[in-house]
Image (tube, rainbow, N blue to C red):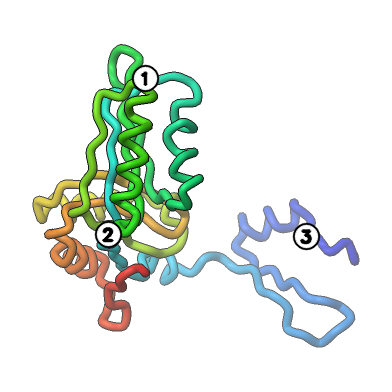
Amino acid sequence: LGAKVLDIRSVSLAKRYKVPVHVRSTFTNTEGTWVVEEDKIMESMLVSGVTYNKNEARITFSKVPDTPGIASRIFNPISDAGIVVDMIIQNTRAGDMTDMTFTVPKSDYERAMKIMKKIAEEIGAESVAGDTKIAKVSIVGVGMRNHSGIATTMFHVLSRENINIMMISTSEIKISCVIDEKYTELAVRALHDAFELDKKNLPLEES
């Protein structure tokens, strides 16, 4: 009735009984929008592609004191240097200690390591180490977090090919795994086949 919103109960009933809802203006002849049940074909096409990135490096702090503000002390200098951090993983150790691992662009690795070695001394970390021979392999699609089977399939495929996963990150549109760089092509090909992606969805290298 001109409120520009849909009545919650009407939408709920439409969903329960699978009734299409036609949303449109009464003042124009435009088609408007049809709200319908999600297509089963779309559900089966959750993964739309595979991407990879060989231009990242990994840095790990070992045995960092697990105290408030420690992450800020690590990442503030990185941010001030204009270095972009991609994936971050924190692993809790016994005795109020933690490990912190993150990735940066490979082109910024040497600069980041120089900064981090200084920070390691300041915060009392046992050591800081890096690795430039890594790659990030990702599957992309829609609603990835809402379908646990997608991640499980990805992990199983990599395990089947004897590829170790170093880091994992997830979002609504992407699940990414950091692996040894030498297995990039094998991982990409195996994932492409496992999710039955056709030739139109060839693996893409991330910029």
Whole-angstrom CA distance, mark 1 to mark 2, is 31 Å
* First in sequence: mark 1 vs mark 3: 3
> Label 2 belongs to which residue?
137
Callout 3 amino acid? Leu
> Label 1 belongs to which residue?
65
Can residue 178 be seen here? The reply is: yes
Among all residues in the image, which is located at the extreme bottom?
29
Callout 1 amino acid? Pro
Residue 131: image location, x then y, percent? 21, 47
Check whether the beta carbons of the residues at disc 1 and disc 2 lie within 8 A of each other.
Answer: no
Q: In this view, does 173 lie above or below 207?
A: above
Badge 3 marks a residue whose secondary structure is loop
Among all residues in the image, which is located at the extreme left?
162
> Label 3 belongs to which residue?
6
Residue at 73% x, 83% y: name it.
31
Q: In this view, does 65 lie above or below 99?
A: above
Badge 1 marks a residue whose secondary structure is strand
Callout 2 amino acid? Val
Pick the quarter of the image with the C terminus.
Answer: bottom left
Callout 2: 10 Å neighbours few (<14), some, many (20+)? Answer: many
Left or right of 185? Residue 86 is: right
